[in-house]
């Protein structure tokens, strides 16, 4: 009798420990699902912004947590007395359904980057080879002094226009002499936080109407690229602050709001906006920027996840090229260049206009 009592007591103690661990796992998984849902819905919250920046990885982690939690739930119910299962099944079932729904919504948002339906139709537009435009953007990294890999990347990819960020005056002068893009401009905004906010643009086409103060205290160049005769495209190269703290997150978002106001002047023109936005494709702030400017589209949409910055496998896409809806995108790619923590991004465009190149 004593041995039987000890056996029952041991089993109850084991069950109690397993129950505590199970509910801890369920609570943690639910908390992660809530954070993921909140990050997709709300902007301007620093920790949520950091989480949503790595949405593919966070979604994968939540999927793994959900699988483990579901298996633990099955084991948990198999050990419950029959009379206490019904009410717990209902409550835990609702929680698991919520977690699964959050996971599905995140998966849909991630895989939407793979939807190439619209872009497949665009490839049939403007097939005239003389109307193509190859543009790129690259965050050089301010302390990267390796110029040859950049020069080779420009030549190998036949770029017509290249925007750059985190480029010093000396690097700009050195690259200007060696890159076969005869028209260029450099702007060091002398930002309070980081001198790396400086930006430059190199172009095969003449640049006019150059402005650098459209958005105060951030790296930006506004210019008009004259493709031929009266054919022009408005060009903006930007580099807002990195959201390294709530203060700089708010500062970045304020600058993006000013960019939105600035873009209203170019609704009827052909526009290209490129830069290190320090803003991921998954952020509600990025979605809002495109929603408020429906005449623009993300040139990377349909070409995969294509992360551009981050250590090892913890990567995200914060470098973007936005173009007018009437500009067709025939290809988008990333290019690794030695010396930078960013990848170069390149978009092949087709424009309904004649283009005359200057060598």
Image (cartoon, rainbow, N blue to C red):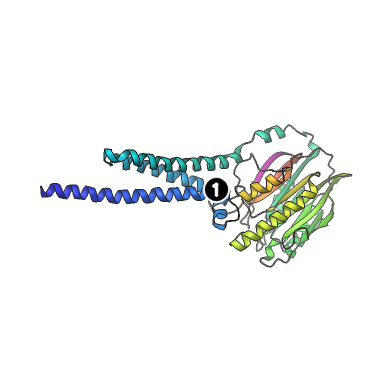
Q: Residue at x 83, y 39 (%)?
A: 353
The verdict on residue 167 being magenta is no
Percent across and percent down for residue 123 are 71, 34
Q: Is residue 357 left or right of residue 272?
A: right
Q: Residue furthest left?
A: 1
Where in the figure is residue 47, as x and y percent of width and height?
54, 57
Residue visible at 82% across and 54% down in the picture: 183
The answer to whether one can see residue 241 in this image is no
Crowdedness of circle 1 by 10 Å Cα count: few (<14), some, many (20+)?
A: many
> Which of the two residues, 15 or 157, is positioned nearer the viewer here?
15
> How many marks overall?
1
- Is residue 108 rendered to the left or right of residue 159? left
Residue at disc 1, secondary structure: helix
Residue range in magenta is 329-333
Q: Is residue 259 above or below residue 97?
A: below
Q: Residue at 49% x, 45% y: name it.
A: 60
The residue nearer to you, when weighing 131 against 293, is 293
Q: Is residue 17 above or below residue 327?
A: below
Image position of 245 with respect to 87: above or below = below
Helix, strand or loop: magenta stretch? strand
Query: In x, y percent, where is residue 285?
Result: 63, 51
Quick one: 158 or 54, which is closer to the camera?
Answer: 54
Residue of label 1:
55
């Amino acid at each position: 009798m004593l041995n039987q009592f000890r056996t029952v007591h041991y089993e109850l103690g084991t069950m109690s420990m397993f129950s505590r661990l199970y509910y801890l796992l369920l609570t943690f998984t639910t908390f992660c699902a809530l954070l993921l849902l909140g990050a997709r819905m709300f902007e301007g919250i620093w920790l949520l912004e950091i989480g949503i920046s790595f949405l593919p990885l966070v979604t994968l982690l939540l999927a793994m947590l959900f699988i483990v939690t579901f298996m633990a739930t099955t084991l948990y119910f198999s050990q419950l007395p029959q009379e206490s299962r019904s009410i717990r099944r209902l409550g835990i079932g609702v929680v698991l359904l919520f977690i699964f729904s959050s996971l599905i919504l995140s998966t849909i948002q991630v895989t939407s980057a793979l939807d190439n339906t619209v872009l497949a139709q665009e490839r049939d537009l403007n097939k005239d080879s003389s109307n193509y435009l190859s543009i790129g953007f690259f965050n050089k990294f301010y302390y990267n002094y390796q110029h040859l890999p950049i020069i080779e990347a420009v030549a190998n990819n036949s770029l017509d226009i290249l925007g750059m960020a985190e480029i010093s005056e000396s690097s700009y002068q050195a690259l200007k002499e060696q890159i076969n893009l005869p028209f260029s401009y450099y702007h060091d905004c002398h930002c309070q936080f980081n001198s790396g906010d400086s930006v430059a643009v190199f172009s095969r086409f003449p640049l006019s109407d150059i402005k650098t103060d459209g958005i105060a205290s951030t790296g930006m160049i506004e210019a008009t690229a004259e493709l031929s005769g009266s054919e022009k495209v408005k060009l903006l190269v930007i580099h807002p602050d990195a959201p390294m703290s709530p203060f700089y997150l708010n500062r970045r978002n304020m600058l993006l709001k000013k960019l939105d106001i600035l873009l209203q002047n170019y609704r009827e023109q052909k526009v290209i906006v490129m830069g290190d936005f320090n803003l991921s494709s998954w952020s509600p702030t990025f979605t809002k920027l495109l929603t408020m400017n429906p005449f623009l589209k993300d040139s990377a949409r349909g070409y995969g996840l294509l992360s551009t910055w981050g250590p090892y496998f913890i990567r995200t896409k914060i470098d973007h090229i936005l173009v007018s809806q009437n500009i067709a995108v025939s290809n988008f790619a990333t290019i690794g260049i030695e010396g930078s923590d960013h990848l170069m991004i390149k978009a092949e465009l087709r424009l309904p206009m004649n283009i005359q190149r200057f060598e």
